[in-house]
Structure formats: C-alpha cells, structure tokens
Image: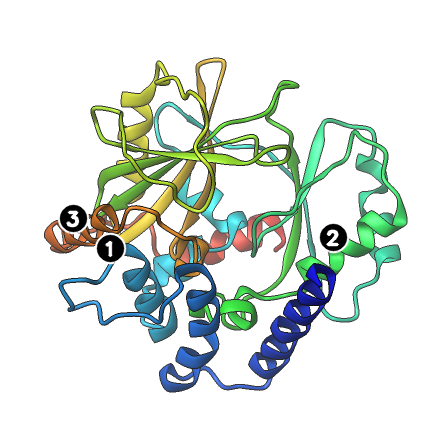
C-alpha cells in the first residue's frame, strides 16, 4: 500500500510540474500551482499576509508568486552572481570558482563528463547555480548514472517546480568550485535577515547523512522550541565567531527586504554559501505556529526601507562580472 501511495504521489507532482511548464507567469495562475506544495507542507492553504494569523510561510508564499523582485534579488538568486555581491566584505571568504558551464534541455551527461574531466580527482565540488540540494564531490568515484541524475535535477527550474518567480527564465548553469570542507560534515549557518538586521539563525547539521535543524534567536543564540522542517539535533554549540557572522550577514542583506544568508564556519574562517529569498517555498512544516506568526510580525516591524549601498549592486557591475567570468 505504501509503495502504491508513493507512486501515486510522484505521479501527482509530475503532473503538476508538467502543467506548470506550460502555464504563464501570472499571480492568479501561480497561486494554485504553488498552493499544492504549500498545502503539502503546512496542511492548509495560504493565509493573507495581512491576517493576524499569517506566518512566515504565508509571507514567503505571497512574495514568491507575485514576481515583484528587485534587481539585486534577481541577480543574487544565482549562486554564481551572489559570490560577486558578497565579495569584498571584511572577514568573509568566497569559495573559488574554477569553471562555469551553461546547460539547456539538450545538454547530455557526455557533455558534463567531458567538461569535468580536468577536475576529476581534485578537491572540487560541482553544483547548480540556480537550485539547491544536489552536489557532486569530484574527488570521489563517479558513474554515469550519478551524472545523469544530477543533470536531470539541474535542468529543472524552481519556477516550474514551485512557482518561485525569481527563478523565472533564469539561465541554468553548473559551477565547479573549491570544496571548502576539511573532511567532516559541514554545519550550515543560515541567517534570516530583514533590511540588514539578522533576527533568527537556522543551523542545519548532517545534510547529506541525517539532516537535522535547530533555530535560534539572535544575538543571544537562544534555541527556539520549534521543529522547522526537520527533527531537532541533540546539541548545537554556539560558534565562536557568531558575532562576526551576524555582522557579515547583516552587511550582505542591507539592500533587500528579506533574505536568508547562508554561511559556513570552518576552523574559525567564515565562508559564503548563498542567498535565499523564498526558503523552501514556504512549504517546510513549522511545529510552533505562535513562533511562526511572531516571525512574520518581526519582519513587518523591521521592514521599513533603508538607504541602499551606493554603487555596489548596480546592473553595470553585474554585467562587468559576467564578462570577466565568461558566464
């Protein structure tokens, strides 16, 4: 019975995806497609953001289907460009980009294998610039099936999967970059920021083995009594450089209303991960609804616009970077 249910579930989601492929990017059409994923995670349909019972997930859902993104948000959803935006911040290291490869629906596993051939056996990783959750370690044995599965995943768009409109018509690329891990499992430090103020920290541990997650208030690093999509880890130690990571996350986020800034701390060094504007498309289940409501209220309280950082995040700067890296 369970096997039949899983098969039916896959068929339903595949049907929704195929419908999404041919559906234009309009709010009234985005809503029903995205609402399926929202309902799956939250066991209810989205609430109006103006409602007193609206939560952080309702806020994420609303902003992702309305397609009212600023230029910076559209740039930084691409991991390749986001590195450039984050570069130059004191105390922040950026994983070195080794190579970038554009893909489309005609790209084959043979194309990828040929491209990564010079990098095999070296301490590099390969991942999509336009999505998350899949990574290939190039210093480990690979087979064709692994590459085919990775490529099929990478050809999909988060716009078509969940109507995250910042990904609409986004160019798909693969990136090879330095593997910043030193052998052990990395902990992800994900800072929820509103107009340059970090209000919560999400810590993910064991992402590729036994994924668990904890959420902390800032700056006191007090754990919140909530399960946010995953079970709670037994213990998460306060990172020694937490204050510096908060400072970096707040610097990166000063020009946007809401963003999750992902960082890594390795042997005291802080590395940039990515910027996420609609975390999990608002579909990660939150066990503590009172906290989820308070989260949105914090965003509303902090979201008054501030002055932008002059000159740094201009379209001209992005195009210049694009020419430099040959993207």
Q: Secondary structure at mark 1?
A: loop
Q: Which quadrant of the figure contains the C terminus?
A: bottom right
Of 144 and 117, nearer the camera is 144
Q: Quadrant of residue 219?
A: top left
Does the residue at mark 3 contact the one at mark 1 (Cβ under 8 Å)? no
Check residue 298 in the rendering and tell me which mark sits there, or answer none: 3
* Horizontal side, residue 159 vs residue 56: left or right: right
Residue at image location 41% in from the left, 62% down from the top = 74
Check residue 257 in the rendering and tell me which mark sits there, or answer none: 1
Q: Give the spatial CA distance, label 2 vs label 1.
A: 33 Å
First of labels 2, 3 by sequence position: 2
Q: Is residue 9 visible to us here? A: yes
Q: Quadrant of residue 227?
A: top left
Check residue 150 in the rendering and tell me which mark sits there, or answer none: 2
First of labels 3, 1 by sequence position: 1
Q: Secondary structure at mark 2?
A: helix
Image height of 149 relative to 263, above or below: below
Relative image position of residue 318 (x, y in whole percent)? 44, 55
Residue at image location 34% in from the left, 52% down from the top = 313
First of labels 2, 1 by sequence position: 2
Q: Quadrant of residue 183?
A: top right
Q: Is residue 256 visible to us here? A: no
Of 89 and 262, nearer the camera is 262
Image height of 10 relative to 215, above or below: below
Relative image position of residue 32 (x, y in whole percent)? 43, 80
- Judged by depth in the image, the label closer to the viewer, 2 or 1, is 2
């Amino acid at each position: 019975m369970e096997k039949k249910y899983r098969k039916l579930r896959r068929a339903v989601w595949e049907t929704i995806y195929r419908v999404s492929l041919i559906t234009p990017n309009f709010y009234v059409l985005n809503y029903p497609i995205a609402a399926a994923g929202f309902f799956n995670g939250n066991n209810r349909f989205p609430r109006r953001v103006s409602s007193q019972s609206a939560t952080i997930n309702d806020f994420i859902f609303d902003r992702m289907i309305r397609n009212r993104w600023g230029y910076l948000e559209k740039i930084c959803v691409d991991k390749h460009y986001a590195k450039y935006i984050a570069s130059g911040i004191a105390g922040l290291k950026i994983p070195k980009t080794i190579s970038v490869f554009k893909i489309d629906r005609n790209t084959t596993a043979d194309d990828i294998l040929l491209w990564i051939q010079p990098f095999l056996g070296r301490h590099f990783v390969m991942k999509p610039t336009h999505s998350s959750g899949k990574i290939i370690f190039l210093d480990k044995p690979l087979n064709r099936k692994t590459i085919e599965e990775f490529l099929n995943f990478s050809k999909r768009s988060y716009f078509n999967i969940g109507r995250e409109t910042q990904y609409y018509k986004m160019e798909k690329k693969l990136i090879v970059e330095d593997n910043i891990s030193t052998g052990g499992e990395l902990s992800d430090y994900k800072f929820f920021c509103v107009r340059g103020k970090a209000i919560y920290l999400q810590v993910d541990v064991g992402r590729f083995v036994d994924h668990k997650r904890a959420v902390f208030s800032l700056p006191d690093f007090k754990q919140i009594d909530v399960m946010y999509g995953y079970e709670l880890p037994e213990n998460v130690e306060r990172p020694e450089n937490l204050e510096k990571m908060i400072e970096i996350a707040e610097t990166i986020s000063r020009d946007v209303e809401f963003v999750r800034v992902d960082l890594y701390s390795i042997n005291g060094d802080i590395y940039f991960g990515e910027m996420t504007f609609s975390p999990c498309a608002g579909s990660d289940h939150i066990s503590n609804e009172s906290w989820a409501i308070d989260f949105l209220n914090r965003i509303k309280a902090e979201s008054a616009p501030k002055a932008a950082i002059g000159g740094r995040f201009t379209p001209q700067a992005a195009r210049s970077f694009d020419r430099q890296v040959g993207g």
